[in-house]
Each structure stands twice: as C-alpha cells, then as structure tokens.
Image (spheres, grey):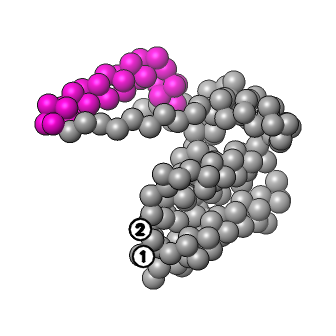
C-alpha cells in the first residue's frame, strides 16, 4: 500500500472504528483478568490551541497550526510532531545516564521534522510545558535525577531552537 493510500486510510472513519473496536476488546480482556484500566483524558490539539489563544499567546502560530489541522496532510504533520515530542520527553525520562550521546542523537533525529515549521516548533514547546506542569509525570529519580532531567529538557529545547529550526 502506498503512503498516500495508507495516510487516507489512517485518517478515515473506518480506521477509527476498527481502532475503537480493538480498544474495547482489549479493555474487556483486561477487565476479565481483574485488571481495571486507568483512563487519562488528554486534550485534543484544537482544545490546547483554544486555551493558548485565550491566553493571547502565540496567535500567529496557533492560526498556522489550525490551518495545518484542517487538511489530512497537515493533521498528520501535527500528529507526527506530537509523537516526536512525546518520544523525546519519554527518552528524557528513561534513557540511562550512560547513554547521553545516544539520547542527544536520537532527539535530534526525532525532532528534525518538527523543526521544519515554526508552528510545529511552538506546538512542541507547548507539549513540553504541559508535561513539565503535570504532577503525574513518571520518572525514576534514583536513575534520572532532577539535574539530569533538566539538562535533557534543555537539550530538547535547544534542538527546537537550533540552527535547523532557524534555517527555515
């Protein structure tokens, strides 16, 4: 299946219906084993953008991001930027201290596509700020202490502010 056809399928109602059915089935199987799922309610990109706009911040970037969300290709870009940012944050919380070189290389690779658009860069910053404000952020502080975590977050921000982002 070519990428265009796959992209159209992934953004279709049929795919959403199949994904929802798979989730319902998985939850049922967990509950049958006595495991109660925990649900986390996440805001949609549009809800976050609305909140940011109401604070009168980043109006131009919000408008650009809304424009991206109005097209299937743009929505995929926003989804990819969200995934890349979340992956970089997860690495910041879980990569062993001895793997710092790999960590830096991987976040550069993951965030390269985010740096392609100022609106996506701002979206990534918003995700990072939201994660840092979340008290439920899970990290083994015995392995990833506060100083290391702060350095890693700083490294992620530097990638977003780096020469790759400024060239565009």
**Residue at left 74%, top 48%?**
122
- Is residue 158 shown above or below 133? below
User: Is 23 located above or below residue 90 in the figure?
Assistant: above
Q: Residue furthest bottom?
A: 98
Instruction: State the predominant SS element of the stretch in magenta.
Output: helix
Q: Position of residue 82 (x, y in %)?
A: 58, 45
Q: Which residues are magenta?
A: 7-34
Farthest residue in the left direction?
33
Given residues 72 and 44, the one toward you in this image is 44
Q: Image quadrant of residue 167?
A: bottom right
| Place of residue 154 in the rendered image (x, y in percent of width and height, measured from the top left) | 67, 69
Q: Contact (CB < 8 A) between labels 1 and 2?
A: yes
Q: Which residue is mark 1?
A: 143
Measured Cα–Cα span from mark 1 to mark 2: 6 Å
Query: Quick check: 115 left or right of 149?
Result: right
Up-down relation of residue 131 to residue 60 (above or below): below
Q: Is residue 64 above or below residue 86?
A: above
Residue located 65% across and 29% down the image = 47
Residue at point 79%, 48% (across, down) = 118
Choose between 40 and 18: the one closer to the eye: 40
Image quarter where the N terminus lies is top left
For disc 2, the marked residue is 140
């Amino acid at each position: 299946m070519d990428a265009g056809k796959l992209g159209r399928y992934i953004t279709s109602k049929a795919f959403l219906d199949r994904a929802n059915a798979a989730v319902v089935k998985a939850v049922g199987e967990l509950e049958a084993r006595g495991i109660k799922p925990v649900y986390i309610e996440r805001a949609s990109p549009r809800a976050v953008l609305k909140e940011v706009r109401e604070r009168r911040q980043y109006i131009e970037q919000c408008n650009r991001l809304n424009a991206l969300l109005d097209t299937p290709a743009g929505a995929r870009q926003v989804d990819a930027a969200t995934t890349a940012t979340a992956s970089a944050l997860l690495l910041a919380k879980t990569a062993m201290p001895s793997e710092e070189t790999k960590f830096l290389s991987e976040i550069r690779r993951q965030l390269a596509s985010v740096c392609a658009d100022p609106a996506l860069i701002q979206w990534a910053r918003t995700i990072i700020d939201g994660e840092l404000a979340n008290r439920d952020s899970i990290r083994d502080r015995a392995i990833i202490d506060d100083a290391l975590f702060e350095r890693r977050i700083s490294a992620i921000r530097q990638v977003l502010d780096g020469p790759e982002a400024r060239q565009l």
